[in-house]
Amino acid sequence: MHQSFSFGRILGVKVGANWSVIVILWLIAWSLADERFPVVAPGYSTTSYWISGVLAAVTFFMCLLAHELAHSVVARRYDVHLEGIVLWLFGGVSKFTGDPPSAQAELKIAAAGPATSMGIAVGFFALTRLVDGVGGSALAGAALGWLGWFNGSLAVFNLVPAFPLDGGRVLRAWLWGRHGDKRRATASAANAGRLFAYVLIGLGLLQFLIGGFVGGLWFVFLGWFLLSAAQAEASQSMLDDQLHGVTVRSAMTPNPVVVPATVTVGQLIDGWMFDHRCSTFPLVDREGAVTGLVTIARVKSVPADRRATTPAMEIAAPPVELVTCQVDEPLWPVITRLSGSADQRALVYDGDTLAGIVSPSDVTRVLELTQLGNPATIQAPPGP
């Protein structure tokens, strides 16, 4: 899920949102202000209903964020890093850069989200009773009650044993612990996810037939999303299994050609690109520290008449946007980090020394070689 705008970091985790959040926020606020609140709490002004609706909608997305952050807090205890959270139309998507080390860890990480949502639901229901008990605002009670109901529904829905929902991960953890076979457990949980997705799509089509267009469309979209996500999770798990035992050293292109950070784009082309069979060039300062990364694609973006005067650093990806790793790290977690990085490249270090680069073509090569034999025997290609 692509991020449209960022909220910065919360508890060390990058948090962003897709543009679809604006749509769903408006729909929730509208449905509460125009339909629900006037029925359960009559007698208030239209402005009051809309203010309450907007506040409830925003609070609900904060609850969604708490649900996702709960996964992160527990995951850190098992050295599983959460790279980022993106809120979107159907809730939140957390991007982990590795898998839990054991079935028990998977179970605890997966259960943290629904447990948090259920705890929030109980808290809102308690506040609702308190407001009602002291004769407080009926509108405030209605908003609190709705938040309690929606968080409870979120917890229950996420516990459905269908991948990639939290309940599907709980199912995978249970099967993994029982049979000791993570790949088999993932396949079973993904199959359950596909089945549940088809059920939702079927319910949506049924609603179409009986005239429930909006509800039917919602079920179909949700089913389609879960189906796509289940298939993607299953594919990623197979790749993880395929690359088991493969380190970054086996995939990287070693001894990258480095270029002084002071050169222009024209000098880079004439002095390095035509002389070396490389598509990626780290820029380094006088001490040898990497200050940026330039690819052929970035060079091509500079008009020909400006290449002689444009500093290479001006078009380089800065270090903060680059993925870095050590030569003996497992390859799969690094691959999962590449998708959201600048140019999808990783700088590989041996201690403090730049030792290589991992590019998409390097990953493709390793994946093809793992189909031919023992992945542990794969050797890195010769350097440029």
Image (cartoon, rainbow, N blue to C red):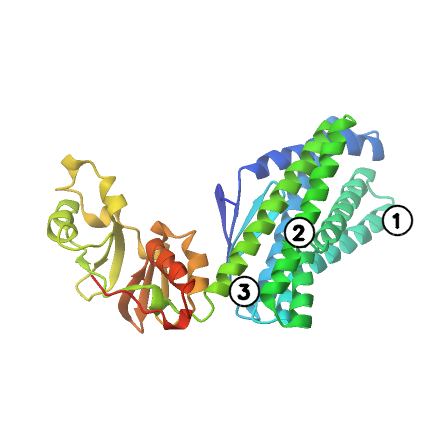
Residue on which the image places disc 1: 133
| Towards the viewer: 207 or 295 | 207
- Res 1 visible: yes
Please tell me which residue is depicted at 30% across the width and 61% down the height of the picture: 357
Coordinates of residue 380 in the picture (x, y in percent):
30, 67
Which SS class for mark 3? loop
Q: Residues within 10 Å of mark 3 (few under 14, many from 20)?
A: some
Q: Residues within 10 Å of mark 1 (few under 14, many from 20)?
A: few
Q: Which kind of residue does numbered mark 1 sit on? A: Gly
Which SS class for mark 2? helix
Label 3 and label 2: CA atoms lie apart by 19 Å
Q: Earlier in the sequence, mark 1 or mark 3?
A: 3
Please tell me which residue is depicted at 69% across the width and 67% down the height of the picture: 174
**Marks 1 & 3, CB-CB < 8 Å contact:** no
Label 1 and label 3: CA atoms lie apart by 47 Å
Q: Earlier in the sequence, mark 1 or mark 2?
A: 1
Q: Which kind of residue does numbered mark 2 sit on? A: Gly
Which SS class for mark 1? helix
* 1 or 3: mark nearer the eye: 3
**Marks 3 & 2, CB-CB < 8 Å contact:** no
Residue on which the image places disc 3: 99
Coordinates of residue 116 in the picture (x, y in percent):
69, 58
Q: Earlier in the sequence, mark 3 or mark 2?
A: 3
Coordinates of residue 197 in the picture (x, y in percent):
67, 45
- Res 49 visible: no
The disc placed on residue 193 is: 2
Residue 61 against residue 218 in the figure, above or below: below
Coordinates of residue 211 in the picture (x, y in percent):
77, 25
Residue 245 against residue 307 in the figure, above or below: below
* 3 or 2: mark nearer the eye: 2
Q: Give the side of residue 251 with respect to residue 270, left or right.
A: right
Q: Which kind of residue does numbered mark 3 sit on? A: Asp
